[in-house]
Structures are given as C-alpha cells and as structure tokens.
Amino acid sequence: MTERYRVAVIGCGGIAANHIRGYLDAGRYDIVALADLSDEAMAEKVTRFGITPRCYHDARAMLDAERPDVVSICTWHAGHAPWTIAAASRRPRVILCEKPMADTLGHAEQMLVACQRNQVRLAISHQRRFLPSYTLARELIARGAIGAVRTIQSFAADGLPNYSSHQTDMYRWLLGDVACDWVMGNIERKTDRHERNTRIEDCAVGVFHFANDAVALLLSDVTSTVYQGAFITGSTGMIALTTSDLQLLNADTGGRWELHTPPGRFGQPAELGEAFEWVEAGAAQAAELAEWLDGTRATFRNEAHEGYIALQMVHAVYESARRHEKVLLPMQTRANPLDVMVESGHLAPERPGAFDIRAFLLRGERMTSDA
Ligand SMILES: NC(=O)c1ccc[n+]([C@@H]2O[C@H](COP(=O)([O-])OP(=O)(O)OC[C@H]3O[C@@H](n4cnc5c(N)ncnc54)[C@H](O)[C@@H]3O)[C@@H](O)[C@H]2O)c1
C-alpha cells in the first residue's frame, strides 16, 4: 500500500495555503498539525480546506508532540533558518522551507548543516520549477530548439531576495542547472526599505554569467514591466516564457511565434487562469516530494543546494555593489552584504525611516514580524 505522510506546517499565512492545497491535491499526505502565533491564521486554513489538524501557538511544542514526517516552513525569511534548525533536530523525513532559503548565506549553511547532522532531507520551495511552461522551455533549450542560449532577460520588483530568488533559480532550471560562475550588479538604496522584515534595495540590476557562456540580465524595480518568466534569445531562435505558456520562434516555426500552453498534471492553464501556477506548481511539487520520500525517485528538483545557489546569486548582486567587482561563485561572504553596507555606514539611508512593503500581511497590531 502507498505510504501516507504526516505534515505539520509552521507559519499559516498566505503561502501556507499553497503548501496545504498542494499536499491535499497530491493525495499522499495528511495535514496533522498547524503552528502559528495567530489563531485567526490557523482557523482560516482549517475552514478553507476542511481539514482537522491540531493547532499550536508554539511550533517547538508541535514538533515534539506530533513528530511529523514532513514539515513545511512558511514564516518570513528570517524565520527560515531557526525553524528549519528546530525542525531538523526533531528528525522529520523532510523539511520543505519557503524561499528565499534564508536571510544570510551563513544561516542557509547552518540549515544545511542541521539537516545533514540529523539525516533530514531539506528542500526549498522554488515551486515554479514544476510549471509545465518552465519545464517545456528547459526541454526545448536542451534539445537545441533555439541553439546556444545567449541571453535571458527578466524583470522583477519588490527587492531581490523575495521576487528575484525565483528568477535566479529559474535561470539555472532553464539552463539545465548549469553553474553560475560570476555575478555583477549594482543597487540604489536611498530609503530604509524592507520586505517581510528583510532589508531590501530601492532598485537593482544584475548580470549573471553561466558556465555555458549564457548570460542572464535582471532589472528589478526599475521598469513598469514586472513578471515571473523571461525572454530568452539563442543563436538560432527565441523563447518568450510566462508562468502559463511560452512562445517559440525558430526556423522550424517559419520565423513566426508559435504558442505552447502545456497542460499541468493537476490543472489546465485555460481553466484556472491566474490560479493555474499556484494550484499546479504546489501540487506537482508535493507529488514529486512524496516520490522522493517513497524512494521511487533518487532526486527532487528543489533539493536545498539549488535554493542555496539561487540565494547566492541574489546576494552576489549586493556583494558586487559592496565590493565594486565581479563576484565569483560560490560566495565567500556569509553575511548579507546589503546589511553590511548599511550597518557600516557605507550606504546609510538618505531618507531615513524604516518601512516594510509587506507590512500589510501582518495581523493585529503588529508592524514587524517576530518570525
Ligand atoms: N514560493 C512562493 O512563490 C512564495 C509566495 C509567497 C510567499 N513566499 C514566502 O513564504 C514566506 C511567508 O510569506 P507569506 O506571504 O505567507 O507571509 P504571511 O505573513 O502571510 O505568513 C507568515 C505567517 O507566519 C506566522 N508566524 C510568524 N512568526 C511565527 C512563529 N514564531 N511561529 C509560528 N508562526 C509564525 C505569522 O503569524 C503568519 O501567519 C516568505 O518567506 C515568502 O518569501 C513564497
């Protein structure tokens, strides 16, 4: 009989809904426990999904009492390392932690160490690797449909760690997880801007070079164009990629754009519209995670080392701005270079007054998170 896995979720806000729906749609899991500081956040999940988990305010008490197989970590970024380390010490089978992997590379390394120490598998939820359009683009590129990839252009916003960790992960997914060997970039930070309690820049540009000589270009918070996806040019063709479809242009398409809208395993883009990527990617990720736990597949496409590289690529833009140099990967600096620049006075805000562009997610009277 197929084994079912017992899931506990730490942090029951917006993205936790995607985890829970994904586990339920995959049909291999039971949501046995939720932990959140907010009763309202947990009650909303119970009602919305018709589940009957035990609810806790203290996530450590939950881990001790429930001993889950799977722990989803859905707190804000700075909570990813402490909660992953706490969960790892209770030895679940796997931890699925939200992106960006951590607030510093040092903390991300501690997550890897804690999981290694306890023989716990760790995955980072860059769920767009499970989108059919992203995977089709990867396959077309691998088949040589656009020749040698020259550039991947992408547009982002809301600070590099949140939005652009998806983009840096996407570059490598599209290129067959080739190594990113150097990063160069710059940022502007005049205000004291934060995103989910993490210091961010006002705007940024980044250039990412890969071992196969492809280059990715990232414009973040500098244009009104912002989307997950990319415009990819190759030596013999081009791909315009979104989260629900792609267009291909090459000699075989007669030099015309050819639309591909690949169906998902759990939903169809045409039927689900904007919801497609969340329904499909969450469930497809949960389904593959179960197969990895079953042992029917040796690898999982969001194993932690991928998320760790995506985070390095983001922090390398900050490090390039700090050091005025092309930053070679793997990164040596474990602190968040943006924090270092600000806290050392090198990049003091010219328009002081900390604010958080995601403060609207908080509940009650809180204006900052203690996650
Ligand atoms: N993969 C994606 O596409 C995607 C999309 C959205 C958010 N995210 C990531 O998910 C994370 C959470 O974002 P969100 O939008 O869901 O935030 P959110 O504010 O909606 O939810 C966070 C929840 O964590 C709870 N929490 C805080 N401290 C806690 C503690 N000590 N113990 C238990 N619960 C605690 C909060 O009460 C809140 O309910 C972020 O790191 C974000 O980057 C990823």
Image (cartoon, rainbow, N blue to C red):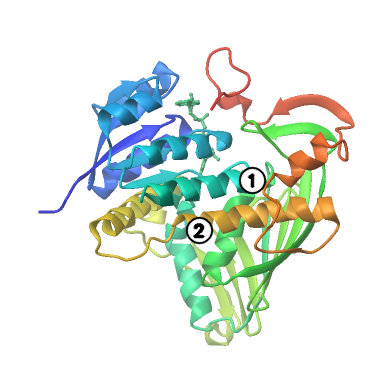
Q: Quadrant of the N terminus?
A: bottom left
Q: Is residue 74 visible?
A: no
Give the crowd class for mark 1: few <14, some 14-19, many >=20 residues within 10 Å: many
Q: Percent from the top left, x then y, of residue 73?
A: 44, 38
Give the crowd class for mark 2: few <14, some 14-19, many >=20 residues within 10 Å: some
Mark 1 residue's CB less than 8 Å from ligand 1: yes
Q: Earlier in the sequence, mark 1 or mark 2?
A: 1
Q: Nearer the viewer, mark 1 or mark 2?
A: 2
Q: Percent from the top left, x then y, of residue 3?
A: 17, 50
Q: Percent from the top left, x then y, of residue 311?
A: 61, 52
Q: Which mark is residue 111?
A: none
Residue type beneath disc 2: His
- Residue 274 lies left or right of residue 78; in this view the side is left
Extreme left residue here? 1
Q: Secondary structure at mark 2?
A: helix
The residue that mark 2 highlights is 305
The alpha-carbon separation of the residues under discs 1 and 2 comes to 16 Å
Q: Percent from the top left, x then y, of residue 64?
A: 31, 29
* Nearer the observer, 49 or 74: 74
Mark 2 residue's CB less than 8 Å from ligand 1: no
Q: Is residue 169 visible?
A: yes
Q: Secondary structure at mark 1?
A: helix
The residue that mark 1 highlights is 161
Residue type beneath disc 1: Pro
